[in-house]
Amino acid sequence: MTADAIQNWTGWDSLPVVHFLILSATIIGAALAVVTLRNLVHAALCLIILFGATAGFFLLLNAEFLAFAQVLIYMGGISILILFAIMLSRKLVGWDIVMTNRQSIPAAIVCMCLGALLLMPPPIGMIHSVDWSPEPSLSITKQMLLDNPEMAATAREYFHQDMVQWFEDQERQAAAENREPIQAVGTTNWYAPNSLALGQSLMSTYTLIFWVASFILTVAMIGSLYIARKDDGMQTDPRGEEL
Amino acid sequence: MPHDVQYTHLAIQNLGWYLNLGIIIFLIGLYGALSRRNAIAILMCLEMMFSGINIMFAAMAEKWGITWTLQSFRLANNVPSPIGQIFIVFIITIAAAEAAIGLALIIAMYRHFRSIQVEEINLLRW
C-alpha cells in the first residue's frame, strides 16, 4: 500500500494511520491478554504493554506531556505496585483453578450489548449518531493578521510558523488547483503547543483541580499506609508466617 | 463567522476510530472486571478501563479541545484551555490513588483471609 493509497482511503496522512494500526493492534492484544491470561504476573506484564501503547496514542494525539506522565506514573509506578501486590499474595496458578466466576457468560453478554449500543451504525449506536464535527470558536482571516500585528506575532509564536505566509501559500496552492482559496481558519483546529497550554492553564484557570488532586493523593497515601500496616496482636497468623 | 467563508480543519480527521478503540478497550476491561475472581486482576482491569477512557479524552481534546479565544491573542497571560487533557490529568491522579488504596485493601484482605479471591470475602454479606 502506498502512502497515497492510505491517504485516499482514510483521509489521513499515511504515517499516523500506520502508527494507529500498529498501536491499536498492540493495545487490543494486550487488553485481551490481561483479561484471559491465567498467570497474574504475565497479565501484569501485558498491562505494562497496554500502558505503553496508551502513551503512544497520547503522542499520536499531540498530548506529549500526558504521554510522558503515563510512562512515569503507569508504566513506572502503578505496574510496580501491582507486581508487588501479586508477589505478596499467594501464588494461584494451575489449570485446575477456575479463573473466572459464574458471571462470566452474563458479563460477556452485557459487554457485547453495551458495545453494540455504543458502536453500531447511526440508528442504534450512540457514538456515531453524534455529529462530532468541530465548530470554530474564532476564525482568523489573513486580513485580521494584517490589521493586527500583535495578533500576527502571537499567532507566529504559538503556531511556530508565519501565518500570513501560510495563508499566502494556501492562496497559491488554490490558484494552482483552480479553486477557491481558504479564507479563514477555525482556531479550534490549529496545532497548539499542548504542554505549554496545559501547564499555564493548570497554574491559572484550573489551579483548583491541581490543589484538589494533590490533596487526594496525600489522603490516599496516608489512607493506604494506614490500611496496609501490620496490626500487632490483632490478627494471629494461623501458619505463623511473616507477610 | 459567516457561513459562506471556507475554513479548514487541521485537526485529526477520524475521531471515530479513536472513540471505537477507547470503547473496545473499556468493554474488554469491563468484561474482565465482571468476570475475574482475583482481586488484583479486577484492579488491573479497572486500570485498563481508565486507559480506554483516557484515549477517548485525548482524541476529543485533539479534535477541538484547545479553544483559542480572541482574548488569548490580545493578552499574553490569557491562555487557551486544554480541558480534555486536564480531565486526563485528573483521571490519572484518581487512578493512582485508587490503585494505591485498592492494593492496600488487597494486602489487608490477604493478611486477614489468606486469600484474594473475591468470592471468599463474605464477612459483610447477609
Image (cartoon, coloured by chain):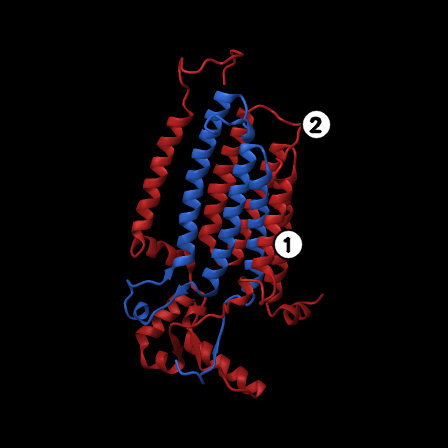
Which picture quadrant has residue A51? top right
Whichever of labels 1 and 2 marks the residue nearer the N terminus, that label is 1
Residue A177 to residue A34: above or below = below
What residue would you read off at disc 1? A22
Mark 1 residue element: helix
- Which chain corresponds to the colour blue? B
Q: Specify the farthest residue to the front.
A: B126
Q: Which mark is residue A96?
A: 2
- Which chain corresponds to the colour red? A
Q: Residue at x 59, y 49 (%)?
A: A111
Amino acid under label 2? Asp
Chain letter of mark 1 equals: A
Chain letter of mark 2 equals: A
Expressed as whole percent of the image width and height from the top left, the position of residue A133 reads 49, 70
Spatial separation of the CA atoms under disc 1 and disc 2: 35 Å
Residue B4 to residue B64: above or below = below
Q: Is residue A130 visible?
A: yes
Quick one: B13 or A170, which is closer to the camera?
Answer: B13
Expressed as whole percent of the image width and height from the top left, the position of residue A107 reads 60, 44
Q: Is residue A27 visible?
A: no
Expressed as whole percent of the image width and height from the top left, the position of residue B102 reads 46, 34
Q: Residue at x 65, y 43 (%)?
A: A105
Which picture quadrant has residue A162? bottom left
Mark 2 residue element: loop
From the image, state whether disc 1 or disc 2 is nearer to you.
2
Q: Residue at x 56, y 54 (%)?
A: B23
Amino acid under label 1? Ile
> Does residue B6 appear left or right of residue A39 in this picture?
left
